[in-house]
């Protein structure tokens, strides 16, 4: 079995699994200095874009292609690659097709689609030049967005006239506003392949704040026990994935309004999720190794549903973690009461999995005592 991997940044998440399953990995990477290149059995350094990866897939006669791209801009191109390789060469690409990827990449069009299909999304309005700033001020606090925003970029929570003017002056693209939702944010990953769909677990990503604190800087927790129950969100996510015809993995971002008891869908992301370590920690299902299972033909939602766990999990932004305390090459949980460290230098995060809440707190207190003291954390 031979698989083409596009992008090396997340290769360490699956390299151990491909070796375990005797899968040969061919890597396509555009940055010669990128991390994890050495983990592939063979690699090509290519120009940006999908033309050369397409040619490599054909030349190497691979059995499947897995794009491990964690940013939005290339996703429509990956969708085009998928449509072409699957139709013309019968090479499966474990990702969403062009139409789905294009929809998800444009946050404004995503909201229109969700609204047209009967899903709640925060009230939004397209902003037309010349901007009527006085009208925008009547909405404060308000979220200002560009269609291609990601990871907090292209998004601003405006609290004043100065905030509004600053954002409008900086951005030249089509912009829109969205009502601020006072509540908390959830994320849920959905795996879908060959018309088999399974939504995993909703991950609590923290309260919404007027400061616009990104979820990467908050403590994430699971299982989720606020607002509506877990199964409600799983059914909702499954319905959306089936409607948009996602394939591979898709991440759905949801805001819960604590005043109205309503959920609002805000984004669909057809790429590996920032909550993938949390999802694996609480369910025992690793979303990225399931992409490998899709490629080799062993993906089975009935088996996943039967074996899905409900462990306690937390992810904490710790900055730097001593490499003397852990093996940075391990990106899987050694047992149900363990942890992994991930993220770039100075932005490390620890994700913990535990069978009980008591075990979770014990691991936290023993592993990062300085952090919990500094941040006055008594229990999770």
Image (cartoon, rainbow, N blue to C red):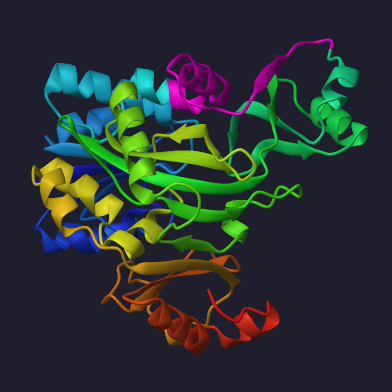
Residue 243 versus residue 259: which sits nearer the camera?
259
Q: Residue at x 33, y 46 (%)?
A: 231
Instruction: Residue 59 in the image: state x and y as whole percent.
Output: 16, 32
Residue at the front extreme, as displayed:
260
Instruction: Residue 248 in the image: state x and y as whole percent.
Output: 27, 37
Judge whether residue 146 is colored magenta: no
Above or below residue 234? Residue 55 is above
Q: Residue at x 34, y 63 (%)?
A: 282
Instruction: Residue 26 in the image: state x and y as whole percent.
Output: 22, 47
> Which of the 4 image quarters holds residue 52?
top left
Above or below residue 39? Residue 122 is above
Judge whether residue 106 is colored magenta: yes
The answer to whether residue 66 is seen in the rendering is yes
Residue 316 versus residue 263: which sits nearer the camera?
263
Instruction: Residue 328 in the image: state x and y as whole percent.
Output: 40, 73
The answer to whether residue 174 is seen in the rendering is no
Residue 318 versus residue 181: which sits nearer the camera?
181
Q: Is residue 290 left or right of residue 222?
A: left
Q: Residue at x 25, y 20 (%)?
A: 83
Residue 14 versus residue 117: which sits nearer the camera?
117
Residue range in magenta is: 103-130
């Amino acid at each position: 079995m031979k698989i083409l991997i596009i992008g090396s940044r997340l290769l360490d998440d699956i390299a151990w699994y491909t070796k375990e399953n005797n899968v040969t990995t061919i890597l396509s990477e555009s940055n010669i200095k990128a991390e994890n290149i050495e983990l592939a059995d063979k690699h090509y350094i290519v120009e940006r874009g999908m033309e050369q990866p397409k040619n490599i897939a054909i030349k190497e006669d691979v059995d499947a292609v897995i794009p491990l791209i964690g940013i939005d801009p290339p996703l429509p191109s990956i969708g085009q690659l998928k449509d072409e390789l699957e139709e013309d060469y019968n090479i499966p690409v474990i990702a969403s097709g062009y139409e789905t990827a294009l929809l998800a990449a444009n946050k404004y069009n995503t909201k229109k689609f969700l609204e047209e299909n009967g899903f709640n999304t925060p009230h939004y309005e397209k902003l037309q030049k010349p901007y009527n700033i006085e009208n925008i001020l009547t909405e404060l606090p308000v979220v200002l967005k560009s269609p291609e925003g990601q990871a907090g970029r292209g998004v601003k929570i405006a609290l004043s006239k100065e905030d509004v003017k600053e954002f409008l002056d900086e951005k030249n693209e089509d912009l829109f506003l969205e009502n601020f939702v006072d509540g908390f944010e959830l994320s849920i990953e959905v795996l879908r392949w060959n018309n088999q769909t399974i939504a995993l677990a909703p991950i609590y990503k923290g309260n919404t704040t007027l400061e616009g604190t990104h979820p990467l800087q908050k403590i994430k927790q699971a299982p989720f026990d606020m607002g509506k129950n877990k199964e409600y969100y799983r059914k909702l996510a499954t319905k959306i994935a089936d409607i948009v015809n996602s394939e591979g993995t898709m991440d759905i971002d949801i805001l819960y309004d604590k005043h109205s008891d309503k959920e609002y869908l805000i984004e669909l992301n057809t790429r590996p999720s920032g909550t993938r370590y949390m999802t694996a920690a609480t369910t025992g299902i690793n979303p990225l190794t399931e992409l490998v299972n899709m490629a080799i033909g062993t993906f089975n939602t009935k088996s996943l549903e039967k074996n899905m766990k409900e462990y306690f999990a937390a992810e904490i932004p710790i900055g730097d973690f001593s490499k003397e305390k852990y093996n940075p090459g391990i990106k899987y949980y050694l047992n149900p009461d363990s942890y992994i460290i991930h993220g770039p230098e100075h932005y490390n995060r620890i994700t913990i999995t535990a069978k009980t809440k008591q075990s979770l707190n014990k691991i936290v207190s023993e592993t990062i005592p300085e952090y919990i003291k500094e941040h006055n954390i008594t229990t999770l």
